[in-house]
Amino acid sequence: AREKGLVKFEGVTVADREDKLEAGDIDCMIATYTITDERSKRFSISDSYYTDYIGILVKYSGDNENSLGDMGEIRSLANLDGKYVGIAKNSTTRDDMLNYINTMNTIKPSPIFCVYESYPALFKALKEGKIDAMSVDVSILSGYVDSETQILPDRFAGQHYGAAVRKGDEALLTYINQAIAN
């Protein structure tokens, strides 16, 4: 039973957040959820409360401050041709990166995408050398930077975050939009 006026927070992952909302395990999802037309067909989504960009995290050689990535070969998105890029399951990253690559006037790299269930799994794969780069929103990448990793300067595909509720829960959506506006 729910107590009036109390909010219970529950952790979700990028892999299970939509399923939890759809099943009614949660009433509202506020989890770096990018507003897209496809997602708006499935859920009611609030006004945007934050805009972030997708970035790329690579291993970093501290010996040379100008060296990014293993052996200094990954300095930007343009160097990802044939490289393994880890992305999160159910994210928009793959399509957004490919769209951005198509707008590039230089060499158009063809990365190989590897899908992982969670951000910690992505980071572990990067550290273990199973992938060459990890690509998610910069605000998420910032939490994984350490002495052995660095975020590349590339930023692409502005991600407008919104809170999602089940279709038909317009009262909750109105309340969320009022909170965002204030």
Image (spheres, rainbow, N blue to C red):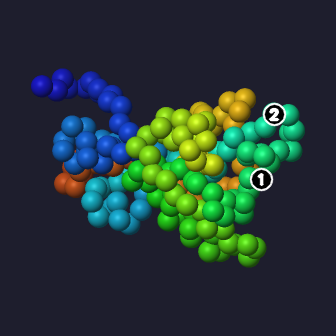
Label 1 residue SS: loop
**On screen, residue 26 above or below 106:** above
- Disc 2: which residue: 62
Can I make out residue 157 in this image?
yes
Three-letter code, disc 2: Gly
Residue at the (50%, 65%) spot, across then down: 95
- Disc 1: which residue: 73
In the rendered image, the residue lying farthest to the left is 1
In this rendering, position of residue 103 left or right of residue 173 = right
Q: Disc number at residue 118?
A: none
In this rendering, position of residue 87 left or right of residue 56 = left
Residue 92: x %, y % from top left: 46, 58
Residue at the (69%, 37%) spot, across then down: 149
**Disc 1 or 2, which lies upstream in sequence?**
2
Q: Nearer the viewer, residue 83 or 145?
A: 83
Residue 26: x %, y % from top left: 25, 38
Three-letter code, disc 1: Glu
In this rendering, position of residue 84 left or right of residue 163 = right
**On screen, residue 101 above or below 17:** below
Can I make out residue 181 in this image?
no
Label 1 close to label 2 by CB (< 8 Å): no
In this rendering, position of residue 109 left or right of residue 94 = right
Residue 76: x %, y % from top left: 74, 56
Q: In which quarter of the image is the N terminus?
A: top left
For residue 41, what is the image quadrant? bottom left
For residue 29, what is the image quadrant? top left
Distance of mark 1 from mark 2, alpha carbons?
14 Å
Residue at the (56%, 44%) spot, across then down: 130
